[in-house]
Every structure is written in C-alpha cells, then in structure tokens.
Amino acid sequence: MAFLPMTAEEMRARGWDQCDVVLVTGDAYVDHPSFGAAVIGRVLEADGYRVGVIAQPDWRGTADFMRLGRPRLFFGVTSGNIDSMLHHYTAARKLRRDDPYSPGGRHGLRPNRALIVYANLLRQAYRDVPIVLGGIEASLRRLAHYDYWDDAVRRPVLLDAKADILVHGMGETAVRAIAGALDSHPAGRQDALRGIPGTAVIVGTAEIGALRGPGCVELPSFE
C-alpha cells in the first residue's frame, strides 16, 4: 500500500490534480495506527476520498501549507499525538531537549499551540476552505479550560483557531460524517456541519435558545 501523498509530485504520480482532504499534522508522517493522522487518512481513503498529508510544516509562513493546493472538501488539522505545549515543556515548565514524534528526535519542528498556529495560517492561505480540528489538543481544549502554561482560563480553542468544527475523542466516525456532509452540501457548509455526534461548533446567540431542552447541559460562559 502506497503512502498518502505529501508533495505535488506524488499527487501527479497518482493522476490527481486536487486532493479532497488535506491533513496537517505536527508529527512526522508515520503510516501506523498509533499516529492519528495516518488512521484518519486511511479511513477517508477507504471511503474513496483523495487524501494528502502535510507533516510538520514551516509555520513561519504559508508556503508549506499550500504545497498540496486547495482541497476540495476541507483541511484537517492536528497538533499530533501529544499536546504541543507538552511536547516542548516538562511539568516544571523546563524546555525539553527532544521530540520523540519528529525525525531523529529533533526538537523545535512544531510551534507552541500548534493547532491554533496551523489553523490560522491555513485561514490566511485559503480563506474559504473549511477547517476541521482534531486530536488530543483539540479534544482537551474544546471548552473553556484552565491552561497550566498560562496559569489562566483560556476560551475554547475553536475561537482562537478560527476553524469551522472540532472533532473530539476518537474521530473516525465523525470525520467520515463531516466529509460526507461537505461532499453533499458544498455551498452550505455551516448548516451541513450542525448536529454531527462527537463534534463541537460555534453557534450564534440567536441559535442558543433552539438548542435548550431535554438532554442539554448549559455551562457558565467563559466571560
């Protein structure tokens, strides 16, 4: 089984002119089920989608994020198998010397708060392409949360990342649903992404009233 393409040349070798989905990850691309991006990529590939991977892009500009071009459906973004801040710092806030999920164990191949950085650079490069967040950094930061590194309560990561939807927990089923929804409703992505189990989205004040009801748990606001 061939690796998922990581360059335009590898796309052309498959006869592709565009990917359906491009996955951006803070880890090296390792095609093994212990790496979330590889699992999600293969799940989508099995459903017939064309999937490319951008691993550990240079976050000092948008060029690396554009190497596979504009995907037809969405960008999927993960910081990797571990929260990016934990990759960089020990519990005593000391800088780590290596990164076990990078080639050669090299440190410094991903930014702090990689999920936010990657998503914002993608939004700069492709303003109208849906962005889907996933992985442990997204899952643990989907609500207002205490951030150990800032020693402060931070708002949900969706707001800082300016993404369209967040997948939390094991994401295979949710990502398949997202791909199917965007494939069926390319012009109305906001409505298409509502109500998918295992996801979080931003809603306006006018929508909150319609969501209240049996089974709804309302938390205090971040403010």
Image (spheres, rainbow, N blue to C red):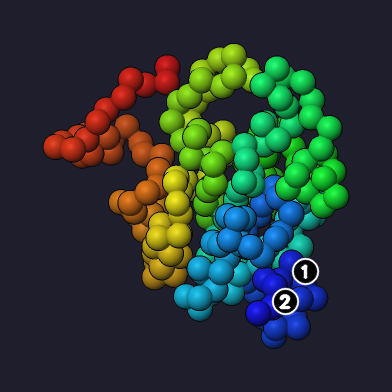
Q: Residues within 10 Å of mark 2 (few under 14, many from 20)?
A: some
Residue found at x 43% / y 64%: 176
Residue sitting nearer the eye, 49 or 205: 49
Q: Position of residue 187 (x, y in %)?
A: 43, 64
Q: Position of residue 17 (x, y in %)?
A: 68, 78
| Callout 1 amino acid | Thr
Residue found at x 42% / y 17%: 223
Q: Which residue is mark 2?
A: 11
**Residue 97 falls in which quadrant of the image?**
top right
Q: Which residue is mark 1?
A: 7
Q: Position of residue 193 (x, y in %)?
A: 38, 54
1 horizontally vs 191: left or right: right
Residue found at x 85% / y 50%: 104
Residue sitting nearer the eye, 206 or 88: 88
Q: How many discs mark residues in the rendered view?
A: 2
Q: Residues within 10 Å of mark 1 (few under 14, many from 20)?
A: some
Label 2: element kind: helix
189 horizontally vs 220: left or right: right
Residue at the extreme left of the image, as rendered: 214
| Callout 2 amino acid | Met
Q: Is 202 situated above or below 47?
A: above
106 horizontally vs 198: left or right: right
Q: In the rendered structure, are the residues bearing label 2 and label 1 in contact, judged by CB atoms less than 8 Å apart?
A: yes
150 horizontally vs 67: left or right: left
Q: Position of residue 163 (x, y in %)?
A: 53, 45
Q: Is 40 situated above or below 110?
A: below
Residue 143 visible? The answer is yes
Label 1: element kind: loop
